[in-house]
Amino acid sequence: MSEQIPYSPQAPYGAPAPVLVATPIVEDSTPAELRVPEAARRPYGEPPRDARSAGYPFAFASMLTGAIALGWLLLNTLFTLLLVAAYGNGSDSTSLSSDSLVSGWAQYPVTYMIMNNLTNLIPIVAALSLGIFAIQRNTPGSPYQAKTNSYATWGLVCGALSVVLWIVGLIIQL
């Protein structure tokens, strides 16, 4: 008499062995207008293809980063002006009078100025480099070629405008 091994796939003593029955193939009842033609089907295991070009994600990221660069630059400039006004008036007032701004620039720490200008460069450089990379990777003849070009161009325009505003801010701070 043999012992049953716990958790084994065998059937216990006295039970009938499992029988494998082949199930008949049933015809597909999907309507003809909803069926995918054989020529358009992809084999199992093959990843789906994307209609967009390889540069599309970079172009979209360039456009968003360019908008973020403009917003970041404007908010950072506003914060710098408020901080300079606070240095000019002491810490009790935050008015933006010209006297407080003129006296605040002298007391404004140079390390803050360097840090602000360098952090402004991060999204600007990202927008410009992503836009250039997207235009290089754009596939001619793809259905999204025009959209990729326009997104990359908007990213480059926002990045270039941010560079101009960044230089104007540098000139004002000096």
Image (cartoon, rainbow, N blue to C red):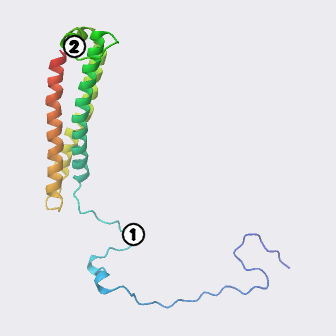
Across and down, in percent, residue 26 comes to 45, 90
Tag 1 secondary structure:
loop
Residue that badge 2 annotates: 101
Across and down, in percent, residue 167 comes to 15, 25
Q: In the rendered view, tell whether residue 2 sits above or below residue 56.
A: below
Q: In the rendered view, tell whether residue 14 sits above or below residue 127.
A: below
Instruction: Pick the quarter of the image with the N terminus.
Output: bottom right
Q: In terms of image quadrants, where is residue 103?
A: top left
Q: Residues within 10 Å of mark 1 (few under 14, many from 20)?
A: few
Q: In terms of image quadrants, where is residue 46?
A: bottom left
Q: Residues within 10 Å of mark 2 (few under 14, many from 20)?
A: many
Across and down, in percent, residue 23 comes to 52, 89
Who comes first in sequence, dot 2 or dot 1? Answer: 1
Tag 2 secondary structure:
helix
- The kind of residue tagged 2 is Leu
Disc 2 to disc 1, C-alpha distance: 65 Å
Number of marks in the image? 2
- The kind of residue tagged 1 is Gly
Residue that badge 1 annotates: 45
Instruction: Pick the quarter of the image with the C terminus.
Output: top left
Q: Is residue 24 left or right of residue 106?
A: right
Q: In terms of image quadrants, where is residue 169?
A: top left
Q: Are marks 2 and 1 in contact (CB under 8 Å)?
A: no
